[in-house]
Structures are given as C-alpha cells and as structure tokens.
Image (spheres, helix red, strand yellow):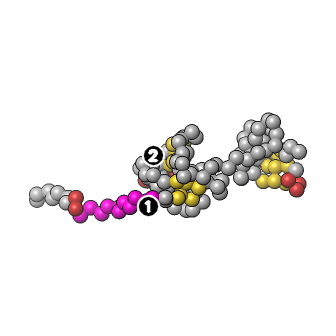
Amino acid sequence: PKPTRINPAHIPRQKFEPPKAGNVIYTSQDEAPPLSLLDFSSDDTNGSSSCRFIRSSMYRVPATSELLGLTKMPMAIAVQPFAPTAEEDKEIPVVDFGTDAGPIRCGTCRGYINLFCNFLSDGKTWTCNLCKAKNKVPQ
C-alpha cells in the first residue's frame, strides 16, 4: 500500500488571540501567562511574581516524577530578576522591615522571611518554612 501524507489543513491548531491594548495580567489568577513576546502590563500587588521575572517551561507542573517522565518535556524555569518592565506595570510593593540589617532571615538556614512562614506567640517568633527552625522577630 502507498503511504499517505498528512494534510496540514486537517491538523488541529490552537487559536491565537493576541491580548487587547491595555491588557492587564493579574498574578493571582489561575490562568496561563501571556506569550513572552506579547505586550502586556502586570499587577503583582498580591505577592506573586510577574511572568516577566519568572517563567516555566510548563503551565501546569505534573504531580509526580513518573507523570513528568511520560510528558517527555523538560521541566525548566527561567528567572530574570532584573527584567525590564512596562510603563503601565504597577510598582512592585517593597516591605520596610524597619531594621538596618535588611530583611529578616532565619538564624539556621539564612532563608528570608516570606509568606509561607508561620508566626507563633502573638507574632514574637516565627517558624522558617525551609528548615522549621524557630526564630525571634526583632522588635
């Protein structure tokens, strides 16, 4: 039998709709980020990073290493902490810790205090989410 060729017109393709002018991406929403070459502005006020600064090779991360192996796709993250921002982007909120030493760090692993740390004793101590060490909050 003669091999048949695949007609490219019959291959399903994802429809691409570029965002409208003034499109704002909210980092708290559970949606795929825009393509990296498109113009957009981002609102990072909820504490998550904009996709300008960090991008993953996958929109959804497989739950197990076996499932990741079945996808045959590499899992990679590109981090650009000094990526240029758009003029329309909201300013990234900066936290003033009120100390000359800078952000509060864990005394054991030197990890920074973050959203995933637990506060104990009416906010006088905190538990590091990386090494589980208890630390005192500076006054």
User: Is 65 or 49 nearer to us in this picture?
Assistant: 49
Region rendered in magenta: 10-21
Between 11 and 93, the residue placed more toward the observer is 93
The reply, left or right, for residue 76 in relation to residue 18 is: right
Q: In the rendering, at what x and y percent does residue 94 appear? A: 70, 46
Question: For the stretch drawn in magenta, what is the main secondary structure?
Answer: loop
Seen at 17% across and 57% down, the residue is 5
Upstream in sequence: badge 1 or badge 2 = 1
Depth check, front residue: 12 or 73:
12
* Number of disc labels: 2
The disc labelled 1 sits on which kind of residue? Lys
Amino acid residing under circle 2: Pro
Q: Which mark is residue 74?
A: 2
> Does the image show residue 108?
no
The single residue placed furthest to the top in the displayed view is 101
Residue 123 shows in the view: yes
- Which residue is at a point 88% across and 56% down the rendered structure image? 122
Q: Residue at x 57, y 39 (%)?
A: 82
Give the position of the C terminus as an image quadrant. top right
Residue at horizontal 52%, vertical 58%? Answer: 24
Looking at this view, name the residue that lies furthest to the left. Answer: 2
**Residue 54 picture location, percent across and down:** 54, 46
Q: What label does residue 60 carry, if any?
A: none
Q: Point out the frontmost of discs 1 and 2.
A: 1
Q: Nearer the viewer, residue 35 or 132?
A: 35
Tell me the residue that label 1 is attached to.
20
